[in-house]
Amino acid sequence: MSDVPEPALEAVPIDVVLAALADPVRLRFVRALDAAGDWVCGSDALRETGVTIGKSTLSYHVKALREAGLIRTRVQGTRRLVTLRYEELGQRFPGLLDLIRDR
């Protein structure tokens, strides 16, 4: 298993994280990931949460979230597994995930 390159979270300023989360599609995506625990690229799991966008648009949003340090993408054969960086986010920005969770 290998990782897609991601920034060190300590180098990511809060304004970059908040800018990534300001987009409604990305916010819904992060909430869906939080609820699901992880997501396999190409699966229908996100559609069940109301995130219904095209593949290229989804790729754009996944890249934006990864570059903002919010998600990790691991390559497993031909699959890509996307997860939130829970522990690192909790250390760098305590309470952030609690604030954005759907209530």
Image: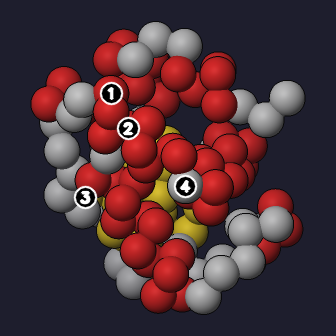
Q: Which residue is mark 1?
A: 14
Q: Which residue is mark 3?
A: 3
Identify the residue shown where x is 39% and y is 83%. Answer: 78
Looking at the image, tell me whether mark 3 or mark 2 is earlier in sequence order: 3
Asked whether, in this view, residue 16 is left or right of residue 7, the answer is right
Residue 12 seen by the camera: yes
Residues at marks 1 and 3, CA–CA distance in whole angstroms: 23 Å
Expressed as whole percent of the image width and height from the top left, the position of residue 77 reads: 36, 78
Residues at marks 3 and 4, CA–CA distance in whole angstroms: 25 Å
Q: Is residue 3 above or below residue 42?
A: above
Expressed as whole percent of the image width and height from the top left, the position of residue 73 reads: 37, 59
Dividing the picture into quadrants, the one containing residue 102 is top right
Residue closest to the eye, 96 or 48: 96
What residue type is disc 2 on? Val
Q: Nearer the viewer, mark 1 or mark 3?
A: 1
Classed neighbour count for the residue bearing mark 3: other residues with Cα under 10 Å, few (<14), some (14–19), many (≥20): few
